[in-house]
Image (tube, grey):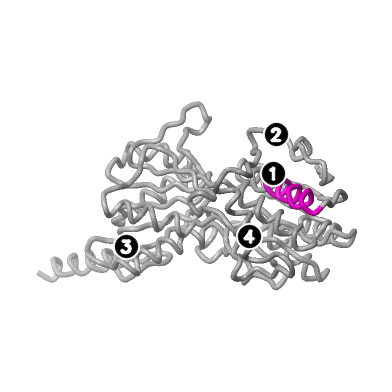
Amino acid sequence: MKKGLSILLTASIIGSLSLVGCGSSASKASGYELALVTDIGTIDDKSFNQGAWEGVEKYGKEKGKTYKYYQPTAKTTAAYVDTINLAIEGGAKVVVCPGYLFEPAVFELQEKYPDIHFILLDGEPHNEDYSEYRTDANVCPILYQEDQAGFLAGYAAVKDGYTKLGFMGGMAVPAVIRYGYGFVQGAETAAAEMNISDLEMKYHYTGGFDATPEAQSMAASWYQSGTEVIFGCGGAVGNSVMSAAEGANAKVIGVDVDQSPESETVITSAMKQLSVSVYDVITKHYDGSFQGGTTTVMGATTNGVGLPMETSKFNAFTQADYDAVFAKLVSGEITTLTDKDAESAAALPVTHVTVDVIE
């Protein structure tokens, strides 16, 4: 009898421990219905993970659904697969995967779990060697028109009076390239409207998404040579730029989410409406209108990108200015070139901006 009681108590303890995780709402018998698997970082990274998590958290709190995030042990497809498996074993019916690095993992698991809905941000499912792309009906990939967000940032910066700009991206992946190309084109459009012909832009990819002394040193040298504002586009690369700006009394443009709380140097941010996207797709999961099997592209026409005007620190660029240029993106009066249209930033057809690509 004692042995049987001991076994039952042990099972009870193990069951309770299995519900302990990185972060969650109050647990229910069914486990955690909504899950987010982070890309190594945490849900308070002031960037991609946080933006996606805010959408999960908002829906969970409003609708009384349990939710939890899981953090992989390594930046590998195998680790992502293991972590997603853990989330599903924990009761997840919807799994949010923020970032292109999840593409192979979702490709592998979409067939294994046909009843689980996956939300894949910034990517489309494919195998490890890119030889096969397939999006099953239980997967909703969401891409963003980063070129439009970058355009708005470049346009606003020049309209606000900045003529010496910098773009410091992370890895030269499509999303980062599109941000940079848009930034150049926005600056060009504003310069043309203002009859400015001597805009300068330094342009560089660091090759990673980490804050490094090298990135901070380069940003500092740019500021020292006269650069007024740098678009820090690549995860923690932006933190390196902010550190350099704080030491130079210079300015920064943030990326992905509103990064104004990160530093007084941030004048605006080229944003993807990550939380809105996640919230909306989770809503569709529960109301039976989940749009799986096809890629959703979020841009100006869907309010999927933009600048946080309520927190931006502009001197001359107004809400009316923003609304006017945003409307032109929506109507198609303004179009932007992307990574599919030019091999490098130096190949963009601009005449008012001199782009100095630094390898």
Cα distance in 3D space between marks 1 and 3: 46 Å
Q: Amino acid at mark 3?
A: Ser
Q: Is residue 101 above or below residue 282?
A: above
Which residue is identified by label 2? 342
Is there a contact, CB below 8 Å, between mark 1 and mark 2? yes
In terms of image quadrants, where is residue 135? Answer: top left
The x, y position of residue 72, in whole percent, is 48, 54
Q: Earlier in the sequence, mark 3 or mark 2?
A: 3
Cα distance in 3D space between marks 4 and 2: 27 Å
Q: Earlier in the sequence, mark 3 or mark 4?
A: 3
In terms of image quadrants, where is residue 278? Answer: bottom left
The x, y position of residue 46, in whole percent, is 57, 64
- Find the magenta span and give its range: 181-194
- The residue shown at (75%, 37%) is 348
- The residue shown at (29%, 68%) is 64
Quadrant of the snapshot with the C terminus: top right
The label number, if any, that marks residue 96 in the structure image: none
Q: Mostly what secondary structure, the magenta segment?
A: helix
Which residue is identified by label 3? 18
Q: Amino acid at mark 2?
A: Ala
The x, y position of residue 263, in whole percent, is 68, 71
